[in-house]
Image: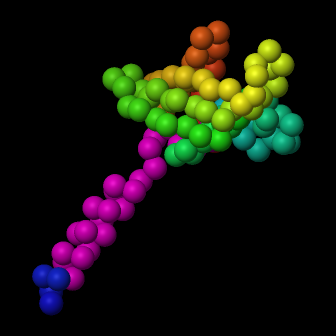
Amino acid sequence: MRRLAMTMAMSACASGTALAAPPYVGTWSHERLNCSAAADVQRQTVFTVDKAALSLPEFGCEHAAFRKTATGWVVHASQCYGSDPTLEEPFARVIHIERHGAMLRFTWPGFDSGPLVRC
């Protein structure tokens, strides 16, 4: 009985680690003050990433697939909608996320977020 309890406890710890969110998941901004700003400011300054979607300044993507690379992650985002009238919606975009210590940086052709801190 003691072994069974110990095995169950070890399995619970192992599965809890396996289910932990990837380090890019969360809310990010240039300044932490933006994290608690009014909604219109947040829409322009806050990057929100979950395991399957993105909400970035100027656009959001309903689907996102993440692949680990040597420097961070490559995100294949689809079902994206935004404020750029030159793009036919929904559009897709490949986004690179680089990690520098506790900071992240989002890039794609023509865009670089600069260093972002977690909210």
**If the image is split into quadrants, where does the N terminus sit?**
bottom left
Q: Which residue is at the far bottom?
A: 1
In the image, is residue 89 above or below residue 110? below
Q: Residue at x 38, y 31 (%)?
A: 68
With 59 as the anchor, is 27 left or right in this view? left
Whole-percent x, y for residue 50 in the image: 57, 45
- Quadrant of the drawing holding the C terminus: top right
- Image position of 111 with respect to 83: above or below: above
Q: Position of residue 82 (x, y in %)?
A: 77, 28
Report the magenta residues as a range.
5-28
- Is 52 left or right of 3, judged from the image as shown? right
Residue at (72, 41) in percent of width and height: 35
Number of numbered discs visible in the structure rendering: 0
Q: Position of residue 86 (x, y in %)?
A: 80, 15
Check residue 14 for magenta coloring: yes
Which is more toward the observer, 49 or 37? 49
- Tell me if 102 is positioned left or right of 54 in this view: left
Where is residue 10, by image quadrant? bottom left
Along the line of sight, the residue nearer the viewer: 36 or 112 = 112
Q: Quadrant of residue 3?
A: bottom left
Q: Is residue 94 visible?
A: yes
Percent position of residue 70, x then y: 34, 23
